[in-house]
Image (cartoon, helix red, strand yellow):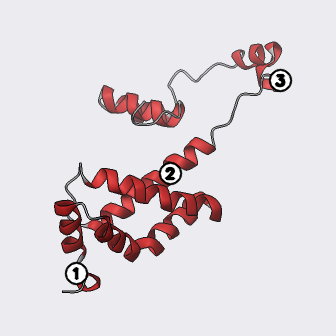
């Protein structure tokens, strides 16, 4: 059977059993438009999207050896989306400008004059209902912009 006619699962099995990168390349080739579309949608930059497509291919080769993949297309979509979201987050952290108004002593003092409501924000109330580990994860990810690994 010609490799172009093989299913995703068959190509994946041939790649994993023999390590022949041609099979992985053919499999990836089928989904480059999808991966590129995900990258463009999230990164909104052609150059960065093209770089991400190549980086995702390299990441794919590494991760396939450690993960059991049942539905390649869906798994690849999630891999591409997560990769691009992490890239976007990495590039959109705002550096602290030491000369910014908010870092001046008087601006900081002014900010401390405001009191938080005693009942807390609706988000804080929701977070209180989560188990401690999940609550910490949400706080670290959204408020401190830390990654899952951090």
Left of 106 or right of it: where is 8? left
The CA span between labels 1 and 2 is 31 Å
Left of 57 or right of it: where is 133? left
Closest to the observer, 1 or 124: 1
Q: Which residue is mark 1?
A: 6
19 w.r.t. 109: above or below: below
74 w.r.t. 1: above or below: above
Question: On the image, which quarter does residue 71 sit in?
Answer: bottom left
- SS assignment at label 1: loop
CA neighbours of label 3 inside 10 A, class few (<14), some (14 to 19), many (20+):
few
- Image location of residue 106, percent across then percent down: 82, 14
The CA span between labels 3 and 2 is 30 Å
* Residue 125 image label: none
Q: Quadrant of the N terminus?
A: bottom left
Closest to the observer, 44 or 1: 1
Observer-side mark, 1 or 2, equals 1
- SS assignment at label 2: helix
Closest to the observer, 119 or 107: 107
Q: Quadrant of the C terminus?
A: top left
- Image location of residue 53, percent across then percent down: 49, 62
Q: Residue at x 31, y 51 (%)?
A: 63
Q: Which residue is mark 3?
A: 99
Q: Earlier in the sequence, mark 1 or mark 2?
A: 1
- SS assignment at label 3: loop
CA neighbours of label 2 inside 10 A, class few (<14), some (14 to 19), many (20+):
some
The CA span between labels 1 and 3 is 60 Å
């Amino acid at each position: 059977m010609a490799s172009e006619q093989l299913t995703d699962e068959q190509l994946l099995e041939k790649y994993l059993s023999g390590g022949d990168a041609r099979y992985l390349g053919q499999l990836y080739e089928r989904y480059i438009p999808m991966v590129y579309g995900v990258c463009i949608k999230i990164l909104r930059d052609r150059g960065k999207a093209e770089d991400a497509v190549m980086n995702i291919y390299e990441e794919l080769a590494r991760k396939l050896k450690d993960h059991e993949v049942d539905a390649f297309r869906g798994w690849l979509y999630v891999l591409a989306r997560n990769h691009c979201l992490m890239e976007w987050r990495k590039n959109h952290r705002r550096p602290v400008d030491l000369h910014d108004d908010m870092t001046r002593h008087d601006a900081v003092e002014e900010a401390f004059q405001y009191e938080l409501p005693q009942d807390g924000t609706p988000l804080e109330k929701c977070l209180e209902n989560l188990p401690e580990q999940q609550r910490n994860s949400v706080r670290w990810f959204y408020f401190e912009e830390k990654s899952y690994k951090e």
